[in-house]
Amino acid sequence: MSNYPDYRITGLTLWKVPLTSHETYYMAEGKTCATVDSMILRVDTDHGVSGWGEVCPIPHYLPSYARGVAPAIEELAPVLLGGNPIGVEALMKACRSHLLGHPYAQSAVDIALWDLTGKACGLPVYTLLGGLQSADLPLYHSITCIAPEDMADIAKDALAAGMRQIQVKLGADNNWEADVARLRLVREAVGEGPLVYGDWNCGSSRLDATRVGRAVRDLDIMLEQPCATLEECAAVRSATGLPMKLDENAHDTTSLLKAYELGCMDAVALKLSKFGGISELRRARDLCLHFGTKMCVEDTWGTDIATAAALHLAASSPAQAVLNVCDLSGYVYPRLDPDAPTRSGGRISPPAGPGLGVTPNPAALGEPVLSLAA
């Protein structure tokens, strides 16, 4: 007989928290990120231990939407309520069998279960994932797609604050020559050494991305997800000779395998809600370790919970494999946990407390949109 307590889930509570970006993000194809709803989930147990999860879909970015989270949680309630949350994998397998697909909604559940398991064990999530391999992690700073000169000024400020990796949003004005100017001026602003990469978020044609790439290939520049398909991204990489980072097209192990075979995955954005949470993202991480692909470990958007979840996985990974992480909560307000880690000198550390190590302030959550009990 085991001496360990038998935990059971007794409640599921979901909040909708509007997150407003400190600066509106303009991206290709008219995509913007200004105020976006984040869905915050708390999973309660009969032992008084709770776990927190989060998913924050950006509209028109990926096949996900904030209003789809509550119905998904209701659909999963018969599996979750009364279930044993400790260990994560077994219960998540049951969730994925009960509700096929919808990885963004399942991501919030998975993150909450990892938080809960860590608290029950008295250990940080990175310890459960194999141990701490990096006490702090490199960040990138993302620059909204505005006038090239203004983007260069933002890059200078980021460099002065210690940032050594700069993501340059491209394509908002559908002007490939302006995108060339953006990359050239930002590269000039930060000088040699810092990583600079241009991100179209799938919003470029193969032709325009190739023209931009060829116009800046005398510079140290990386391209990110110019086109909507892996085949187009591979063609741009081949035509320009510039390294390629993938994002939207990298969403499961099958897509990672295909991208590797096409030779267009020098780096990849591994995002929690694309894959379905920490459990599935860990499998993707291990595959990228096998490939030797540099990884950005993050999520689409969010606050302290999503930031912490990504940091724990990144911190448990070999340092040389992690290209960068993102302090999502540093781009938006409100902050859910004012004591959560923040950027310092271009780097950030994972929380050290049990579980995810973050605790949302109830005043920042408002009234729940869904409350279910066993």
Image (tube, rainbow, N blue to C red):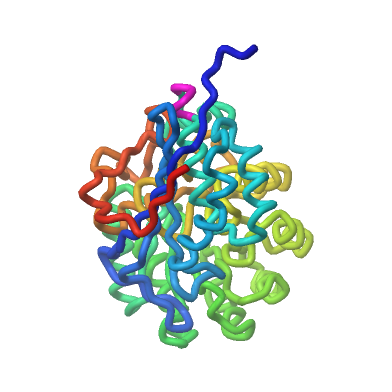
When the figure is inspected, residue 258 is found, relative to residue 290, above or below; the finding is below
Front residue of 364 and 203: 364
The outermost residue toward the right is 261
Q: What residue is rendered at 49% in x and 51% in y?
A: 108
> Does 172 sit above or below residue 144?
below
Picture residue at 52% right of the left edge, 43% below the top = 81
* Horizontal side of residue 350 vs 361, given as left or right: right
Determine the image quadrant of residue 128: top right
Displayed quadrant of residue 46 = top left
**Magenta segment boundaries in residue numbering:** 118-122
Indicate the position of residue 96 as horizontal and vertical percent values: 65, 52
Query: Residue 79, image x and y in percent?
Result: 59, 46
Work out whether residue 297 can be spotted: yes
Q: Is residue 56 left or right of residue 264?
A: left
Q: Is residue 164 magenta?
A: no
Q: Is residue 306 visible?
A: no
Q: Magenta segment: does it hold 121?
A: yes
